[in-house]
Amino acid sequence: MPTRILPEVPLLDHTALGSFLASRFESQSEKLSDIPHPSNLKDAQKGADRLARAIRNHERIALVGDYDVDGVTSTAIVKRFFDLISYPLITTIPNRFSDGYGVSKNVLERLDADVIFTVDNGINAIEAAEVCKTRGIDLIITDHHTPGDTLPNAYAIINPKQSDCPYPFKEICGAQVGWLFMGLLKQELNLSIDMRQFFPFLALAIIADVMPLVGINRAIVKTGLDMMQTSSLSPFVMIRDFLNRSAVSSEDIAFQIAPRINSAGRLEDASIALEFLMADTTEKAYHQFELLTALNTLRKETEAQTTAEAMLHVNPKEQIIVVAGEHWNEGVVGIVASRLVNHFQKPAIVLSVHNGIAKGSGRSIGNVDLYSLIKSQEKHLQKFGGHKMAAGLSMSSDAIEAFRLGINEAAKQINPADFIPHSDIIGELEHEMINFQLLELLERFEPYGEGNPRPRFLIREADVVTVKLFGSDQSHSRLELRPSRLSPKTLELIAFRRTLECPENKKMSCSYTVNKNEWNGRVSIQLMVERVF
């Protein structure tokens, strides 16, 4: 690992920490009443009018979702809405392996409908739009991914990231776009449905799709998590039972629930996850959750093996890592890319090659715009899409080498400072500041996530008292550190899924977070190691 320079950060007490966290939200409204009206979304009214007409005329309506958490949750929201109005909806989520991404020709072949609309996909569905035109199908696209230079020739395109879309809050996920669209449809049909009932689903999607937890996103997530705590819907009863905590946090969703829901589409078929979110009995929710948990365990094993193989292919001298492997599982390449980013501290693209076609995912770091870099190599690609920090792409396997050389050449134009990862370390804490008062202070500024990261603190050059491994497979580490030579007091820190060793000089610097640990009704403070310097 490269040598890291420790950041210069202030020494914080509770007052200074509270002021710092409050400053994150000074310019953002967090009122649900400030959610902009869905009619601000370009084409949304046109799309809602068409769906309302289809419902009144008893036309066949089909929905095409996506296989990640945002896409599955979007599908569940829309399906639940149509169930509420007792209107049949043909619902399909593409299979990652047999259909590929989004509303493809393959998906269209099995849909017999007058109107097709998408959630969380479609902004690059040029070919699918032409197929719909030929068949006389009205295609309505709802998406939130970055549009390309050419838009599909669809009946309506609802996406806040369109340059001429007046919707003021651009960073919303696919489920939010779908929910806003259903809100307009409700209005058009003059129905009395409380759209707030979908907030727990929206919270799940916003957190899982790593949307910034500021402004209206923060308001929705806070409300959604609160509602999740009391919801009688079977999937949320199951989630509460599984977590066994006094309150569901954004981090519980991000690290415990979202990976399980994601694992279905990554390894098998997203319908398993959709059935969990649509479960109408606790028994059904439990059964589906058990399937998701088993798939998630398999996903971890597959990911670990693929990461180990990918590491052997990396050229550490290049600015942009591009690695490819025959028959790597397409469903884990995005996670493997994240692992490579963390290890090498540079953007990474991981490709899985099947039958001469390479499909993969990329993850970025710092201020490097990965989407623009990939777009600069468009001539080598069959498809691509995404945003600044994450993207998907496909190409002929023959083009991989030219793509790798080209994207690294393009990266030479980027300011080297853009490759420096953002440091979220906000300060150092005196030992006596780490108490239950600190825990209460931190809880006041939840939910934490993108745009409002959980505060990370620095321990600088602490004496290492002990390093012990624990867990059934000895894969976790427990550290005992003495931050000050002048004090006999030590701190215990936990590093899950990491095996750490005592440095030769018995000194350690690391960043950490402060968390609430609940076990058997007892609450304690848990310090979690983030990064060792």
Image: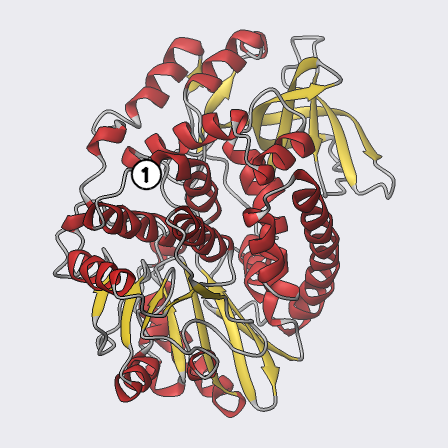
**Foreground of the two, 49 or 102:** 49
Q: Colour scheme used in the picture?
A: secondary structure
Residue drawn 59% across the image and 23% down it: 515
Q: Residues within 10 Å of mark 1 (few under 14, many from 20)?
A: few
**Foreground of the two, 415 or 362:** 362
Q: Is residue 122 above or below residue 480?
A: below
**Foreground of the two, 57 or 432:** 57
Q: Is residue 461 above or below residue 289?
A: above
In which quadrant will I find the C terminus?
top right
Q: Is residue 293 above or below residue 455?
A: below
**Foreground of the two, 461 or 93:** 93
When asked about the image quadrant of residue 375, the answer is bottom left
Query: What amino acid is labelled 1 in the image?
Result: Ile
When asked about the image quadrant of residue 391, the answer is bottom left
In the visual, does 8 lie left or right of 59? right
Residue drawn 47% across the image and 89% down it: 399
Q: Residue furthest front?
A: 57
Q: Name the residue under label 1.
A: 193
Q: Is residue 459 visible?
A: no
Question: Residue 167 in the image: x percent, y percent?
Answer: 17, 49
Residue drawn 43% across the image and 39% down it: 203
Q: Can residue 287 be seen in this view?
A: yes
Residue drawn 23% across the image and 37% down it: 35
Question: Residue 385 in the image: x percent, y percent?
Answer: 37, 70
When asked about the image quadrant of residue 234, the answer is top right
Question: Residue 262 in the image: x percent, y percent?
Answer: 58, 55
Question: Residue 44 in the image: x percent, y percent?
Answer: 20, 57
Q: How many labels does the image show?
A: 1
